[in-house]
Image (tube, coloured by chain):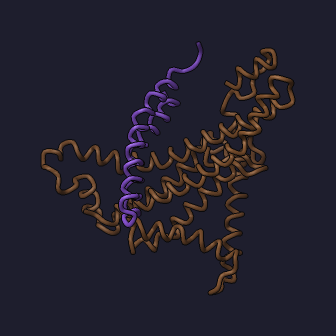
């Protein structure tokens, strides 16, 4: 739609603003531009720099918040403790008492996903590293290894896979069709949907933010038709940012929560 | 007309999960309002259900780009 509007305003000469869409996500490397491994460029580009800066910032927050931990917390320490406590509640409610040892993992997931998503609406960055497929895939693979590993450790290899693929309590005839379905849903679709849910939400959100801001930037200075569109986009843009903030928190929470659910289902058995 | 038919396919594919999500979340809200003490359990089960149903829409999203 924006291309149509832009073409109308600019007399049809408006090529290459948002096309191809890859240019919103793919950036040239700043450093180590020639470093290639197996034909993949491993240069340090904007996405990687944003990830490093955001993760270093959150690491600094946690270090400063817990460096001089006191029984009666200061405000800053109380904030950091609140972040951990949210995940402690998730672990206790979903996994149960055994979930306490997974609180560090869940906190890492929650905080890392939140700050990496938050780069989407953070001035200067305006680009979520989680909208490149590598970050969600890495996080989901970590969750995958953890919940399978926990299942094998707690229930034993044969028992875990046996009970997962052949759930007890169903009619014997169903054992013909049930194992492939269970295999697909437990070991393929779970990590896949974890990754794709985060990835798709971030891609869509980034495109939405970019379209809003580009609309303001392009239309606001031009009179008189474009001015109207630009003003409307300017009014809408805080709502877009608030909506994105909601999505950012929700995705971090859902990822953490589903990881806890999967770990809990590996722990319990049937 | 230019463009990809995949987009229309994705639009159609979202209808089923949309209805499913509406039913799941609506019922969950209803049961939470009736029995607030069971809210934690209902929420957990709701998220599991959402994850299963939403997988269809996510598969469609991926296939819209991949095919």
Can the viewer see residue A38 in this picture?
Answer: yes
Residue A155 sits above or below residue A203 on the image: below
Q: Between residues A174 and A4, which one lies in front from this camera angle?
A: A4
The residue under the point 61% across, 48% down is A130
Decide if residue A265 is on the left or right side of residue B60.
Answer: left
Quadrant of the image containing the C terminus of chain A: bottom left
Please tell me which residue is depicted at 50% across the width and 20% down the height of the picture.
B5
Q: Nearer the viewer, residue A257 or A185?
A: A257
**Residue under the point 50% across and 59% down:** A256
- Residue A61 position by quadrant: bottom right
- On screen, A14 above or below A186? above
Residue A38 image-quadrant placement: top right
Residue A155: image x %, image y %?
29, 67
Chain identifier, colour purple: B
Classify A74 as above or below A122. below
Residue A189 in which image quadrant? top left
Instruction: Pinpoint residue B16: horizontal percent, then vertical percent.
Output: 39, 34
Q: Colour of chain A?
A: brown
The spot of residue A66 in percent (x, y) is 66, 78
Residue at the far left: name it.
A172
Along the viewing direction, whichever of A82 and A95 lies nearer the viewer: A82
Question: Which quadrant does the N terminus of chain A fall into?
Answer: top right
Q: Residue furthest bottom?
A: A71
Q: Residue furthest top?
A: B1
Q: Is residue A25 above or below residue A19?
A: below
Q: How many marks?
A: 0
Spot occupied by residue A239 in the image (x, y as percentages of width and height): 68, 44
Residue A43 appears in the rendering: no
């Amino acid at each position: 739609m924006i291309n149509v509007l832009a073409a109308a305003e600019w007399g049809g000469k408006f090529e290459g603003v948002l096309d191809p869409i890859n240019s919103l996500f793919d950036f040239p490397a700043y450093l180590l531009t020639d470093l290639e491994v197996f034909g993949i460029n491993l240069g340090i580009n904007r996405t990687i720099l944003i990830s490093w800066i955001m993760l270093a910032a959150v690491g600094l927050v946690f270090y400063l918040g817990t460096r001089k931990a006191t029984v009666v917390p200061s405000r800053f320490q109380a904030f950091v403790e609140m972040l951990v406590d949210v995940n402690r509640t998730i672990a206790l409610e979903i996994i149960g008492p055994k979930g306490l040892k997974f609180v560090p993992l869940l906190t890492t997931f929650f905080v890392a996903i939140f700050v990496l998503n938050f780069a989407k609406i953070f001035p200067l960055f305006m680009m979520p590293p989680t909208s490149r497929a590598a970050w969600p895939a890495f996080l989901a693979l970590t969750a995958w290894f953890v919940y399978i590993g926990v299942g094998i450790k707690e229930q034993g290899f044969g028992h875990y896979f046996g009970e997962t693929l052949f759930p007890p309590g169903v009619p014997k005839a169903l054992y013909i069709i049930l194992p492939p379905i269970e295999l697909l849903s437990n070991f393929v679709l779970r990590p896949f949907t974890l990754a794709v849910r985060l990835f798709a939400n971030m891609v869509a959100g980034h495109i939405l933010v970019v379209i809003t801001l580009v609309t303001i930037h392009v239309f606001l200075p031009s009179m008189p038709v474009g001015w109207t569109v630009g003003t409307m986009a300017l009014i809408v843009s805080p709502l877009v940012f608030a909506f994105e903030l909601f999505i950012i928190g929700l995705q971090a929470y859902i990822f953490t929560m589903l990881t806890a659910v999967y770990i809990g289902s590996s722990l319990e058995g049937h | 007309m230019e463009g990809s038919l995949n987009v229309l396919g994705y639009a159609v594919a979202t209808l089923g999960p949309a209805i499913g999500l509406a039913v799941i979340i609506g019922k969950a809200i209803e049961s939470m309002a009736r029995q607030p003490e069971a809210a934690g359990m209902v929420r957990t089960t709701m998220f599991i259900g959402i994850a299963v149903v939403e997988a269809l829409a996510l598969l469609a999203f991926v296939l819209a780009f991949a095919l």
